[in-house]
Every structure is written in structure tokens, then in C-alpha cells.
Amino acid sequence: MNTAHREAILLTPGPLTTTLRTKVAMLRDWGSWDSDFIAVTARVRSALLDIINGQDSHVVVPLQGSGTFSVEAAVATVVPRDGHVLVLDNGAYCKRAARLSTLMGRKTTVAAFDEAQAISPQSLEAHLQADGSISHVVMIHCETGAGVHNPLHDIAEVCARHGRGLIVDAMSSFAALEIDARRIRFDALIAASGKCLEGVPGMGFVFLRREIVAACQGHSQSLAMDLHDQYVYMEKTGQWRFTPPTHVLVALDEAIRQFQEEGGQPARLARYESNYRTLIQGMAALGFKPFLDPTIQAPIIVTFHAPGDSRYEFKAFYQAAKRYGFILYPGKLTQIETFRVGCIGAIGPVEMEQAVQAVRLALRDLGIASGAPA
């Protein structure tokens, strides 16, 4: 298996493998106050709103930094300082959302679910009925700790019925799983450049429901991460308040152009689903067992049980697969040993077939006969 002609493919939930066109877009330097760059910012913001059919109902506010920066900014901007956040927790990124909400001084309650199960709309209903002080609900659409696809539509219906705000971390689902703002009511939805749009990391963005924007003034205790101030300044000037990630933005502009050429969200999802099927079938032939039931598995990243062979050790397995041109991801679970394989990025079923072959060769090199768990 010869992969010497190319850089390693990233089978991770982000950063991802990107196209040459996206990489080349970063070769030019930009002035952050220049009219050409201001035009790029406007074009990207409009295109992002188109993806969720949100032009009439939402605004979008880009923010420098990783996706977590934008999650923290969204909670701090949307939730008043005397608000009460309920975090629906079925994985590592839910726990991160709960921690950042607590650190910002917002009262935070966690509704815990098994990491191998989707969050329950019925359980949310019970929590909201029992505690009228809960003002906002935070959920992760695709919890990539294990790869669970959580029921956004059903959760949004419960929140709307009870008049509670909904903040959605759609970091690993946006532009792949369907999100239609005309049918799903949310106060904030967060995503980032380096995920399913297949840009490079370094920029997040938050969709805010137009009806709540004015009321968000003064909520945030942060200067740099105040989305209300960022939005007001950007609407007035077209510019970012502070130095923008210029190369990241123009790479995202180019990545969105390719996303549109491919056929938008339905086509992106179809490719990822094809990647997922190829991966599952190939890994099953090697004895590997997925952690999740397929009914709640998102075609974004798959958690596999570690091989039961005593010679298995993730670091050695990782290095062996890397020698064949593929970067895997460690498990995020605490109770059992696992590893994860991403299905997203500028790759297709051919690369997934090659990835399975790389895993087969890695097992051979380590003297492991089968990927079957203990």
C-alpha cells in the first residue's frame, strides 16, 4: 500500500483533510479593513444563513478561535447572568458545555444520559415541568465523544412548547445533517469552519434568532467574545471588531463554493453516509465492533471497541496506521477502551477503503489477528 505521494488523511472530527483548492485560497494575504475582505465576510455570512434557510429568522456572527470559543460566547451572550442553563449530557462535549456555563457564573444543571444513548425529549419535558427557573437548554446535535446523533427536532419542539431558549452545539453536524431554521426553533446554533464545510480550523460562527438579539446586550462578561457587540459592529462597518483570521475566512469562502458545487447539504450528507457504510462494512470484515447502535449513529465519526488482543495498545496502533497514511483518533469514553474513525472531510469511499486496508496492515504489523473486542 503506497501512500508516499500524499500527506496523511485525517480520519478525525476536525481538523479535516481539505482540498487543494481550499489550501491554495490561503496563499494570498488580506487587509482586514480592505473592501475586498469586507466583501468576503459578507458573502460567507450570507452563504451560511442560506444553509439553514435562516435569512428571515436569524443572523450569523463569526468569531475568531476554535469552536469552543463560540460555544462559550453563545452561552455568555444569550443567557442572562441570572439565567439557569440545563445541559443535556450524553458525552464529553456536553460536559464541556456544562463546565463553561458554570465557569461563566450561570446557574447550571446537568441532565445525565448514557453515552451510548441519545438524549430523551421525554426526560427534558419532565425537567422543564419540574423546574420553572430553567431559562435555557443546551444540547449537542452530534455528540462526537461517541458519535451519537441527538434528536434536535424533538428537543426543539419541547423547548418551544415550554417557552425556553435552546442553544445548539452543531459543531460536527452543520452542513451535513439537515438543520432547517424554518422548522426548528432555536435561539443560538454554533458551528465552525473546520468541520463539515471542510474549511480549516480557526473560526466559529453563531446563528442568533433575530428576535433575541437586542435583548442580549450586556449579558456577556467578556469583551472579545460578546456576540452582541460583534454583531452590531459588523452590521455597522462590515468589519470584525478585532483582527480577523483572514486566511481562515477566505479558505472557508472557497470551501463553501465547493460545498455549493457538490450540491449542498444533501450531497454532503450522502457522501458522508457512503463513507460511513464503507467503513462499517470494511471494519466488520476485520472483526471490529462499533460502540453505538446504528439507529443513533451519526455518519460523522464512529467509535469502535478496541481489539481484545493483549498486544493491542492505541499508541502503537495509531503509529502503525499513520505509517500507511491515515490519522485515527483516540476514544473519548471513560468506561471502556475505544478508538474513533471519522467519516468527514474531503474524502470519499475510495479513501475509506484505503483506510480499512491501512487498519488491516496495522493489525498485521502488531501481530493482531482480529479486531474483535474482548
Image (cartoon, rainbow, N blue to C red):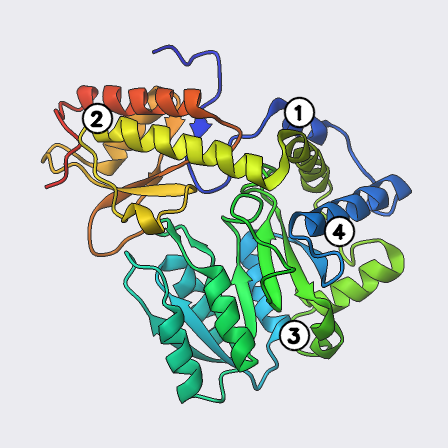
Checking the image for residue 21, the label placed there is 1
Image coordinates for residue 31, horizontal then vertical, percent: 83, 41
Asked if residue 247 is positioned above or below residue 169 in the image, the reply reads above
Which marked residue is nearer to the observer: mark 2 or mark 4? 2
N-term mark: 2 or 3: 3
Reading the image, the residue beneath label 4 is 243
Mark 3 falls on what kind of element? loop
N-term mark: 2 or 1: 1
Observer-nearest of 25 and 224:
25
Observer-nearest of 114 and 310:
114
Q: CA distance from mark 2 to mark 1?
A: 35 Å
N-term mark: 3 or 4: 3
Q: Quadrant of the N terminus?
A: top left
Answer few, some or many: residues within 10 Å of disc 4's Cα (few below 14, many 20 plus, some between 14 and 19). Answer: few
Relative side of 288 to 272, left or right = left
Q: CA distance from mark 2 to mark 3?
A: 51 Å
Q: Check whether the beta carbons of the residues at disc 4 and disc 1 lie within 8 A of each other.
A: no
Q: CA distance from mark 3 to mark 4?
A: 20 Å
Checking the image for residue 220, the label placed there is 3
Mark 2 falls on what kind of element? helix
Q: CA distance from mark 1 to mark 3?
A: 37 Å
Answer few, some or many: residues within 10 Å of disc 2's Cα (few below 14, many 20 plus, some between 14 and 19). Answer: some
N-term mark: 1 or 3: 1
N-term mark: 4 or 1: 1
Image coordinates for residue 182, horizontal then vertical, percent: 65, 60
Q: What's the residue type where badge 4 is placed?
A: Thr
Residue drawn 41% across the image and 58% down it: 150
Q: What's the residue type where badge 3 is placed?
A: Ser
Reading the image, the residue beneath label 2 is 285
